[in-house]
Image (spheres, rainbow, N blue to C red):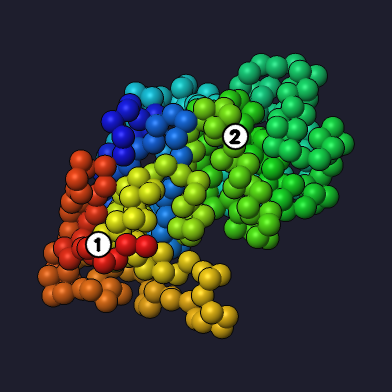
Amino acid sequence: MSEATPLLELENLSITFATPGGPVYAVSDVSLSVERGKALGIVGESGSGKSVTMKAVMDLLPSTATIGGQATFDGTDVLTMPSSRRKHFYGVDVAMVFQNPMTSLNPVKRIDAQMTEGMRYHRDLSKNDAKKRAIELLELVRLPDAPGRMRQYPHELSGGMRQRVVIAMALANDPSLLIADEPTTALDVTVQRDILNLLDNLRTDLNMALILISHDLGVVRDRTDDVVVMYGGRVMESAQTEDLFADTRHPYARALQLSIPDISKPRGQRLDPIPGSPPDLSSPLTGCPFAPRCTFAQDDCHSTLPVATPVGDGSHTFSCLHPLGQEATV
């Protein structure tokens, strides 16, 4: 990571959920940051803690969650923010786009009502001014026939159109940070590319920070400045995107790279899946969470929890007792 002042910075963030079967240690000691105008990718398998981490920032976790550590946005501690500040922080300073646009939109309300509601509340706009602004936003995200779409219901739009509406809603109050949580999961491949390109272009045009959450390293490779690889609720590796691919140190990050489909491989060649299952987080980890699935694991990997180790100037870190060397570069 660079030395510029972060817009959002998490320090040793930990999240524990109380359940009937006991506590679940969903996130442990996660530290990351993103600067204004930059893009950060958070990558890992389902259950790695990526979405939960960002939902803590957005105050979207249930009452069963206990949060420790710090989350600072532009110098303000988000976790201790008074309620009077919160109602004009979420959706204004920071906004979030979720994976399934159909569940993000109210099925019984027209697009115009959903587009204008937040603007009228946060910006005190008149009904007509809010509608004009909504049409401008729909045009900004390149939704065809924006004025006509305003009178439609979500079910009348395609999946790609609905996701564009959700992105437009997230941009309604000019956020400094946009969090996109698997924003293309329910979309076909060509629409996925368009949505990801749209987010990247909006970040550049609006000088907005972007956090892109994905299970696919291939998605973030050409669209982010930095990448954080998570597994078992912990950060396995963190680096500038180019450095991560050029000098991969953690076996899990390497395994994610190998699982990316490669069209240059001979037809019929099988992908390289990661064997095994994610760890059980119902008890604190005593060793590396990836050790049971790691082909490079040694005895100490199962008993010693690795700490973040810097590479070079410290912008690249990894948490592994037996890291990969230059032979693992892509």
Which of the two discs, 1 and 2, labels the residue nearer the N terminus?
Answer: 2
Q: Callout 1: few (<14), some (14-19), or many (20+) C-alpha neighbours within 10 Å?
A: few
Find residue 274 and report its horizontal and vertical position in percent.
Answer: 39, 74
Disc 2 on helix, strand or loop?
Answer: helix
Disc 1 on helix, strand or loop?
Answer: helix
In this view, 159 is above or below 33:
below
**CB under 8 Å between callouts 1 and 2?**
no
Question: On the picture, is 156 further left or further right than 71?
Answer: right
Three-letter code for the amino acid on which mark 1 is drawn: Gln
Q: Callout 2: few (<14), some (14-19), or many (20+) C-alpha neighbours within 10 Å?
A: some
Find residue 45 and report its horizontal and vertical position in percent.
Answer: 43, 63
Q: Quadrant of the N terminus?
A: top left
Q: Quadrant of the C terminus?
A: bottom left
Residue furthest bottom as drawn: 268
Residue position for label 1: 326
In depth, the one of 223 and 10 nearer the eye is 223
Residue position for label 2: 202
Residue at 74%, 27% in the rendered image? 136
